[in-house]
Image (cartoon, rainbow, N blue to C red):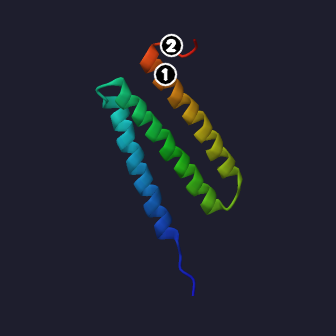
Amino acid sequence: MTVSLMPVWYLVNACLAIAMLCSLWRLLRGPTAQDRVTALDTLYLGAMLLVLLQGMQAGTRVYFDIALLMALLGFVGSVAMAKFLLRGEVIE
């Protein structure tokens, strides 16, 4: 007896898409720059999770490598934006 996981995949994809739309709204409407940086960080995290879900559905490892690259670039970008907001410059 096997159970189909398709409705679960659709539900998880829909929840992540709604979370990304909320992050996009905060990115566009954020009253401060810190809100926008946090929204951008949440947005790239949601995109990375969507890529991971697609990798689990497809059953290939290429998606996991792409998600790892997205995580690394997103972390470096978040640190650079936070440093810029604190000091006004990125490279000292």
Residue at the (55%, 35%) spot, across then down: 74
Q: Give the position of the C terminus as an image quadrant.
A: top right
Circle 1 packing at 10 Å, graded few (<14), some (14-19), many (20+), is: some
| Residue where numbered disc 2 is placed | 89
- Secondary structure beneath disc 1? helix
Q: Is residue 2 above or below residue 76?
A: below
Q: Is residue 57 left or right of residue 26?
A: right
Position in image of residue 17 (x %, y %): 43, 50
Asked if the residue under mark 1 is in contact with the one under mark 2, i.e. CB atoms within 8 Å, the reply is: yes
Q: Is residue 42 above or below residue 13?
A: above
Residue at the (60%, 62%) spot, across then down: 57
Q: Residue flagged by tag 1: what amino acid is it?
A: Lys
Residue at the (53%, 51%) spot, across then down: 50
Residue at the (36%, 24%) spot, across then down: 33
Q: Which residue occupies the extreme right position in the image?
A: 61
Q: Residue flagged by tag 2: what amino acid is it?
A: Glu
Q: Nearer the viewer, residue 35 or 92?
A: 92
| Residue where numbered disc 1 is placed | 83
Q: Is residue 77 left or right of residue 11?
A: right
Position in image of residue 42 (x %, y %): 44, 41
Q: Is residue 46 above or below residue 5?
A: above
Cα distance, mark 2 to mark 1?
A: 7 Å
- Secondary structure beneath disc 2? loop
Q: Nearer the viewer, residue 8 or 70?
A: 70
Position in image of residue 75 (x %, y %): 55, 35
Does label 2 or label 1 sit earlier along the sequence?
1
Q: Give the position of the N terminus as an image quadrant.
A: bottom right
Circle 2 packing at 10 Å, graded few (<14), some (14-19), many (20+), is: few
Q: Is residue 45 above or below residue 91?
A: below
Position in image of residue 15 (x %, y %): 40, 55
